């Protein structure tokens, strides 16, 4: 972990840079694969699956029986843990449902807004270095609650060309039946254009590595919506002398083990804590099964000492972390001033990994400072709003003149006529009744 001593705001631009590759470096490859998948469909998907995932598949579809029988391969203990996570995530996302908004803006003019499910969604479940079946729950549950009609799940095949049984089990819980063993750029391209076997969707959601994230961004050029750029994991912990250094170290390592391009940051007003966390991280790292990945990620880790909580807060808002953990005496100060973060974990007893798996919040979150403008996945990510209006005779008389004036002022005669003809017809009817 590289340590910085009270850096000034001018250095924030450099310090908030993420280790992932620039989009411009990734785009040539992403574009090539998109073009090929568009032209050749499943054949191109198979070619890139073999190249990047090292398996040759005759078919990328997972058959219904495999999904139904997924229970068999899992321990009772794991199924119970998945079921608990399912329940909590469902509870939190179900509570996000909103009522129809209906307003009579002026007498006789009624406007309302209703949410409708996006009919066809594609869920990307990461599976390169680990099959993240928890992402199935994070995406499948809100899709199920929203009522999306066609839910298509894609995830890279295992080294043996199979779908991880945990993914199949979580998908079964969420009522997902269309599953394809394809990952990376080729999966996003397949969902964008459709292939002989994989349906085209209207929106692609889900986290992934930098290739997946860049591909999702290109998909938006082809009339496909995305949730957000949810790339390599990040955690920023702000902690001071009240924090337990071993807890902080464990939290930082939990996100470092995701991938070599993950980034973890420790911000503190205590130089002593920075040192203690570093020592604890080194010790804990030795025992990790993914030590190699985590150590590589730690090359990008930074520890920053700030003299005041205000400087620390300014840095946090500039960095806009995917996850923010607050283990500090100044907890309420940070919460009050916080502007930018994907998801926040408050207090020493709130490990970030609780949110990754089971507390109820969603773990699909904006990375690379996109928390400045994007929210993490939530129920609304699977819905769109339609507005409606109905105008009565009184309403038209109340609003008509103003619309005519506005249309005239914009030089749009036909717009004005659409009102004028109606007003005239109302007047004629009234005259006839007299
Ligand atoms: N932001 C979030 O909400 C969030 C949530 C969970 C996970 N994540 C991140 O998701 C990522 C998962 O990454 P992963 O790699 O394990 O799985 P992944 O499924 O995202 O990516 C694996 C795929 O990447 C492709 N690929 C690998 N190397 C490539 C190369 N050199 N060129 C082109 N394509 C290549 C392959 O097709 C492979 O199938 C991690 O970075 C993790 O931090 C983010
Ligand atoms: N921390 C990841 C989001 O960046 C989500 C995850 C899945 N499994 C474990 N963690
Ligand atoms: Zn995680």
Image (cartoon, helix red, strand yellow):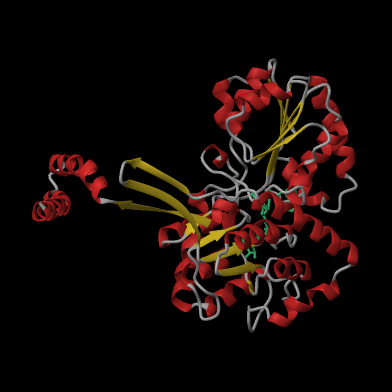
Whole-percent x, y for residue 247 in the image:
85, 35
Q: Quadrant of residue 105?
A: top left
> For the point 82% across and 32% down, which residue is it?
348
Q: Quadrant of residue 61?
A: bottom right
Determine the residue located farthest toward the top in the rendered image: 307
Say which of 187 and 365 sits in front: 365
Q: Is residue 102 above or below residue 246?
A: below
Q: Is residue 38 above or below residue 11?
A: below
Whole-percent x, y for residue 278 in the image:
82, 32
Say which of 157 and 428 sits in front: 428
Whole-percent x, y for residue 200 in the image:
49, 71
- Is residue 363 something that shows in the picture? no
> For the point 80% across and 60% down, which residue is it?
83
Q: Is residue 312 above or below residue 50?
A: above
Number of numbered labels in the structure image: 0
- Is residue 141 something that shows in the picture? yes
Say which of 350 and 33 sits in front: 350
Q: Is residue 49 above or below residue 113?
A: below
Q: Is 131 left, or right, of 219 in this rendering?
A: right
> For the point 26% across and 46% down, which residue is it?
395
**Which quadrant is the N terminus positioned in?**
top right
Whole-percent x, y for residue 53 in the image:
67, 69
Determine the residue located farthest toward the bottom in the rendered image: 58
């Amino acid at each position: 972990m590289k340590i910085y001593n009270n850096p000034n705001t001018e250095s924030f631009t450099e310090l908030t840079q993420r280790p992932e590759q620039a989009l411009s470096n990734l785009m040539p490859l992403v574009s090539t694969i998109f073009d090929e998948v568009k032209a050749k469909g499943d054949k191109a998907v198979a070619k890139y699956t073999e190249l990047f995932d090292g398996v040759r598949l005759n078919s990328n579809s997972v058959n219904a029986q495999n999904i139904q029988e997924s229970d068999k391969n899992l321990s009772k203990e794991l199924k119970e843990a998945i079921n608990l996570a399912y329940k909590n995530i469902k509870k939190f996302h179900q509570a996000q449902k909103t009522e129809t908004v209906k307003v009579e803006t002026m007498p006789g003019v009624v406007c309302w807004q209703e949410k409708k499910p996006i009919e066809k969604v594609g869920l990307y479940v990461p599976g390169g270095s680990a099959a993240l079946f928890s992402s199935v729950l994070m995406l499948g549950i809100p899709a199920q609650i929203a009522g999306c009609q066609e839910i298509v799940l894609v995830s890279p095949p295992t080294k043996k060309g199979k779908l991880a049984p945990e993914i199949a089990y979580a998908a079964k819980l969420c009522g997902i039946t269309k599953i394809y063993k394809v990952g990376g750029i080729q999966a996003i391209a397949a969902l964008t254009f459709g292939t002989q076997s994989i349906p085209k969707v209207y929106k692609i959601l889900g986290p992934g590595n930098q290739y997946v994230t860049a591909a999702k961004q290109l998909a938006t050029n082809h009339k496909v919506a995305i949730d957000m750029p949810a790339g390599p994991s990040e955690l920023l912990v702000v902690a001071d002398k009240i924090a337990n250094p071993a807890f902080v170290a464990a939290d930082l390592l939990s996100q470092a083990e995701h991938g070599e391009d993950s980034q973890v940051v420790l911000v503190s007003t205590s130089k002593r804590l920075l040192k203690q966390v570093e020592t604890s991280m080194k010790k804990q790292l030795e025992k990790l099964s993914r030590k190699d990945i985590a150590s590589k990620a730690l090359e990008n880790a930074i520890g920053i000492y700030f003299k005041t909580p205000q400087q620390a807060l300014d840095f946090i808002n500039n960095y806009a972390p995917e996850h923010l953990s607050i283990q500090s005496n100044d907890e309420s100060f940070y919460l009050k001033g916080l502007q930018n973060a994907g998801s926040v974990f408050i207090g020493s007893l709130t490990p970030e990994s609780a949110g990754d798996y089971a507390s109820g919040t969603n773990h699909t979150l904006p990375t690379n400072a996109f928390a400045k403008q994007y929210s993490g996945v939530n129920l609304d990510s699977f819905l769109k709003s339609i507005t409606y209006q109905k105008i009565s005779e009184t309403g038209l008389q109340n609003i008509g003149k103003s619309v005519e004036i506005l249309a005239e002022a914009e030089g749009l005669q036909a717009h004005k006529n659409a009102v004028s003809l109606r007003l005239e017809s109302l007047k004629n009817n009234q005259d006839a009744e007299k």
